[in-house]
Image (tube, rainbow, N blue to C red):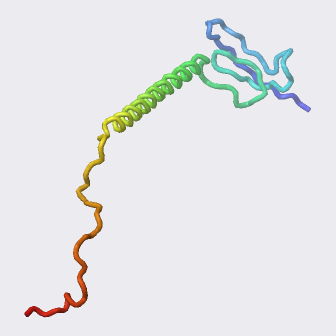
Amino acid sequence: MSQQSAECSSYYSADGVFVDSFSCPKPGNAAAAIYCCGFNDIKYCCDDANSFFPYEYGYMWWLSIGALVGLSIAAVVLLAFLITVCVLCYLFIVTKPTRRLDNGLPLRGNKSPKVTNLECFSLPS
């Protein structure tokens, strides 16, 4: 059974220090850590072949800061919307008239005289 290994190329760390290339797994690491992982400026051995990202580690912080700024703006917009809705509801309730409006239709029963069938068919004299 042959053991796989990966070569992590040399790089400059985030502090500007040159780090020589090394093979995975490193002595003292788990035997399953056969892949070169990390970023262009921080490399280490791990067991996931898809854990190398071809950009600097600091780039992830900028993504996080951008996401936080976006979420903060969305939260402020949502809060402004909710405050506006509450104020409009309050104004709607407060400015309602206290007495009922007259709709112009009387709700009385019909008091007209009752017409009989004979009156409908009588001929004029």
| Above or below, 11 relative to 72 | above
Q: Position of residue 66 (x, y in %)?
A: 51, 23
Vertical placement of residue 10 versus 71, above or below:
above
Seen at 84% across and 26% down, the residue is 32
In which image quadrant can residue 15 be found? top right
| 54 on left or right of 118 | right
State which quarter of the image contains the C terminus: bottom left
Left or right of residue 31, residue 109 in this image:
left
In this view, the residue in front, 85 or 112, is 112
Q: In the picture provided, is 85 more to the left or to the right than 23?
A: left
Q: How many marks?
A: 0
Quarter of the picture containing the N terminus is top right
Residue 119 position (above or below residue 52): below
Q: Residue 106 placed where, x, y %?
A: 26, 60
- In which quadrant of the rendered view does residue 82 lie? top left
The residue sitting at the left extreme is: 125
* Most foreground residue, 92 or 8: 92
Depicted 58 relative to depicted 104: above or below: above
Residue drawn at x 53%, y 23% is 68
Q: Quadrant of residue 88?
A: top left
Q: Residue at x 45, y 26 (%)?
A: 76
